[in-house]
Image: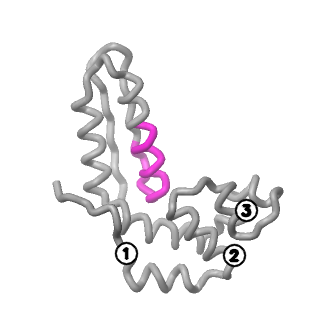
Amino acid sequence: MTKHSKKQTLSRASKERIAALPVRKQAYVAARLRGESKNKAALEAGYSKSVAKNASDVIETQDVTQALRSALRELIPIDLLAQRVREGLDAKAGRKANIDLRGRYVDRAAKLLGVKGMSVGAEAEEKPQVVIHLDY
């Protein structure tokens, strides 16, 4: 596996895709890329509380989703996701909570990246069972 630096920059294409969005949507995408929740990102971008509560339906239109996924695919390469899955597999069975937590993070990252059909889970007190299907 390759080592990933903490600070990565976006490609010109991703920057242009984000720049093509309306200003508030640009601010929303920037906040989401910093790791903010949908609600907090919407509020920071200047949306009302009611819109922020429904960010998935109101703000995350196809253009925003494409801009986010494009950027996230650069910032979170698929091999990094695979590395995290591997770490989950290598975790000790006695640390089930950590295995489940890692699985949730991988699931969330896969969803953000638009990786379809990926699921990660652990069985209780047994060796972690991980099932991965990637339609990338």
Q: Check disc 2 and report its element: helix, strand or loop.
A: helix
Residue 35, position in %: x, y?
52, 57
Residue at numbered disc 3: 43
Residue 80: quarter of image: bottom left
Range of the magenta residues?
A: 103-118
Q: Are marks 1 and 2 in contact (CB under 8 Å)?
A: no
Amino acid type of the residue tagged 1 in the rendering: Thr
The kind of residue on which mark 2 rests is Arg
Q: CA distance from mark 2 to mark 3?
A: 10 Å
Residue at the spot 36% in from the left edge and 29% down from the top edge: 99
Mark 1 vs mark 3, CA separation in Å: 25 Å
In the picture, the disc for residue 9 is: 1
**First along the sequence among labels 1 and 2:** 1
Q: Quadrant of the C terminus?
A: bottom left
Q: Which label is found at residue 24?
A: 2
Q: Residue furthest left?
A: 1
Q: Is residue 113 magenta?
A: yes
Q: Residues under labels 1 and 2: Cα distance?
A: 21 Å
The answer to whether 2 is drawn above or below residue 120 in the figure is below
Q: Quadrant of the N terminus?
A: bottom left
Q: Residues within 10 Å of mark 3 (few under 14, many from 20)?
A: many
CB under 8 Å between callouts 1 and 3? no
